[in-house]
Image (tube, grey):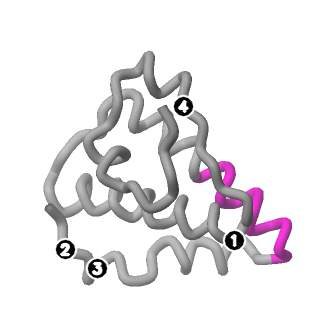
Amino acid sequence: MLRTINDSRKVLAGPAPEVLANESVIVADPKEQMVDHVAVLKLYAARVLYNGEVLLPWEEIDKAARIIEFFALGCSFKCTHRDLVKVMYQGLSQMETR
């Protein structure tokens, strides 16, 4: 099963853990990867902060991997950690949750 960057519903609904381990994310452009990571991270944050939800174990693993990769990609573009944190929090308070 392949997940594209535009299919955030699969990230929200989440595949079974055994499917997640076999997934490949196809994104060629590192900037697109960063956009994808921050979008999903904001959805996770909104669910936890505004809906009081608890992320599933596979979502926690996905979140941690996305944070690590987001910061690694950002640093490769010479962004500071402060800049990257700003990007992650930008617009979070205005997000509508489902």
> In this orientation, which residue lies closer to the viewer: 16 or 93?
16
Q: Earlier in the sequence, mark 4 or mark 3?
A: 4
- Distance between the Cα atoms at labels 3 and 1? 23 Å
In the picture, the quarter occupied by the C terminus is: bottom left
Is residue 26 on the magenta stretch?
A: no
Q: Earlier in the sequence, mark 1 or mark 4?
A: 4
Q: Earlier in the sequence, mark 1 or mark 2?
A: 1
Residue of label 3: 93
Callout 4: few (<14), some (14-19), or many (20+) C-alpha neighbours within 10 Å? few
The magenta segment: 67-78
What residue appears at the point 24 percent right and 40 percent down from the top-left corner?
A: 54
> In this orientation, which residue lies closer to the viewer: 68 or 39?
39
Residue of label 1: 31
Q: Position of residue 16 (x, y in %)?
A: 34, 23
* Residue 52 horizontal side relative to residue 87, left or right: left
Number of residue marks? 4
Residue of label 2: 96
Give the secondary structure at mark 2: loop
| Foreground tag (3 vs 2) | 2
Give the secondary structure at mark 3: helix
Q: Earlier in the sequence, mark 4 or mark 2?
A: 4
Q: Mark 2: which amino acid?
A: Glu
In the displayed image of the protein, which residue is found farthest to the top? 18
What residue appears at the point 30 percent right and 32 percent down from the top-left corner?
A: 56
Q: Position of residue 48 (x, y in %)?
A: 25, 53
Q: Mark 3: which amino acid?
A: Ser
- Distance between the Cα atoms at labels 4 and 3? 31 Å
- Magenta span main SS: helix
Q: Quadrant of residue 55?
A: top left
Q: Mark 4: which amino acid?
A: Glu
